[in-house]
Amino acid sequence: MTGKALIVIDVQNDFCPGGALAVADGDVIVPGINALMGDYDAVVLTQDWHPAGHSSFASQHAGRAPLEITEMPYGPQVLWPDHCVQGSAGAAFHPDLAVDRAHLIIRKGFRREIDSYSAFFENDHETPTGLEGYLRTRGIVALDMVGLATDFCVQYSALDAARLGFSVRVLGDLCRGIDLDGSMAAALEAMRAAGVDCR
Ligand code: VGL
Ligand code: ZN
């Protein structure tokens, strides 16, 4: 089988300028992503989808500020501003994203006690989202990843996909990053080391 999928990570209002966790120029990638959608056998969108009071929110940790790091049962976790709360305007896709052309929308981060950067597994690296099964039953072997943020959800998704045996490319022109303490350079290095084609 030779199917290929476009995986569009978290192109949501809260990650775009004006949003709660805005990524610089996060909105600039939208027209280019739309233009690519016709080239794939499957188009998947992911949507960060947290309950109010999610444990990744700094607001839930007394005395802690956004972008500080805390220790969770599953490992270190960056604390974020409240973002992508289920049903909020910030959790909606960017209004110009061609959502109607998606075959599957996969939501993640909906369990209060655990964050989920990756489209495939929650941050314990064990609890699956179900995306792997969807892609395999659709005959997909190759993935192109685009979206937000390069150094968090795109990176985690790409590393998991490579570990699962998919052929993975990250299209850098159609991604934007947060870049926290050198996290962009570290993400590119980790992805390349894992065999991801970062272009
Ligand atoms: C993301 C931080 C928190 C992302 C999601 O989409 O990269 N980053 N939640
Ligand atoms: Zn999140």
Image: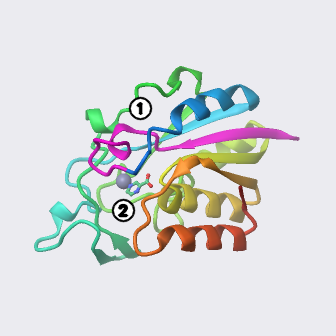
User: Is 67 left, or right, of 177 in this rendering?
Assistant: left
Q: Is residue 87 visible?
A: no
Q: Amino acid at mark 1?
A: His
Badge 1: residue crowd in 10 Å (few <14, some 14–19, many ≥20): many
**Circle 2: element type:** loop
Q: Which residues are magenta?
A: 1-22
Q: Amino acid at mark 2?
A: Ile
Task: Look at the image and tell me in which quarter the C terminus lies.
Answer: bottom right
**Does the segment drawn in magenta span residue 90?**
no
Task: Look at the image and tell me in which quarter the N terminus lies.
Answer: top right
The residue depicted at 76 percent of the width and 67 percent of the height is 195
Answer above or below: position of 54 versus 144: below
The mark nearer the N terminus, 2 or 1, is 1
**Which of the 4 image quadrants contains residue 179?**
bottom left
Query: What label does residue 94 carry, if any?
Result: 1
Answer above or below: position of 76 versus 115: below
Query: What label does residue 114 carry, if any?
Result: 2
**Which of the 4 image quadrants contains residue 53?**
bottom left
Nearer to us: label 2 or label 1: 1
Query: What label does residue 73 carry, if any?
Result: none
